[in-house]
Amino acid sequence: MEEKQQKKLARRLDKKISANVQKLGSKLVYQLLKMYYAAIDKDTPVWAKSIIFSALVYFVLPLDMIPDFIPVTGFTDDISALGLALVQVGSQISDEHKSLAKKRTEAWFGSSEVLEIEE
């Protein structure tokens, strides 16, 4: 993914998280951000980037299999896609990616809630 496309994805991801931060919760936001930071890392293998970017793009798309505005079930398809991607690329997520994700998650939720996040 080109740098221009990465920046556009970052803006859309930030916008979607900001608009739904309470619905998503700190654990899901943290997982999203870990994957994002792994995807933009030059040392992450191309195969892993492809999987991560596919899942993140699906997450930010306004239309998907289960519309996000539906209460309770709206994000289940997004969570499934992200979970599957995370299982496949989990070994490519470094401590640095986790640290960056934790700091950004703290900006949305505060450090006390982020302390509860488990690996």
Image: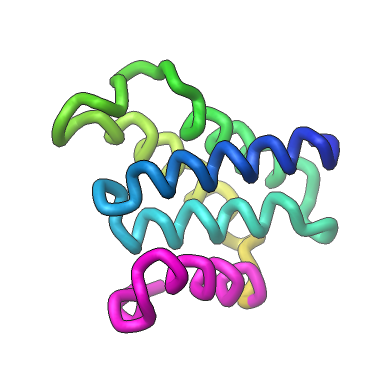
- Residue 18 located left or right of residue 52: left
Identified at 62% across, 63% down, the residue is 93
Residue closest to the eye, 62 or 35: 62
Q: Relative to 100, say whether 6 is above or below.
A: above
- Locate residue 117: give its quadrant: bottom left
Quadrant including the N terminus: top right
Tell whether position 21 is magenta.
no
Q: Relative to 106, say whether 14 is above or below.
A: above
Q: Position of residue 110 (x, y in %)?
A: 36, 76
Q: Position of residue 38 (x, y in %)?
A: 67, 57
Identified at 15% across, 31% down, the residue is 71
Q: Main secondary structure of the magenta part?
A: helix
Q: Which residues are magenta?
A: 96-119
Q: Relative to 99, say whether 77 is above or below.
A: above
Name the image colouring.
rainbow
- Locate residue 106: give its quadrant: bottom left
Q: Position of residue 34 (x, y in %)?
A: 55, 60
Identified at 49% across, 73% down, the residue is 102
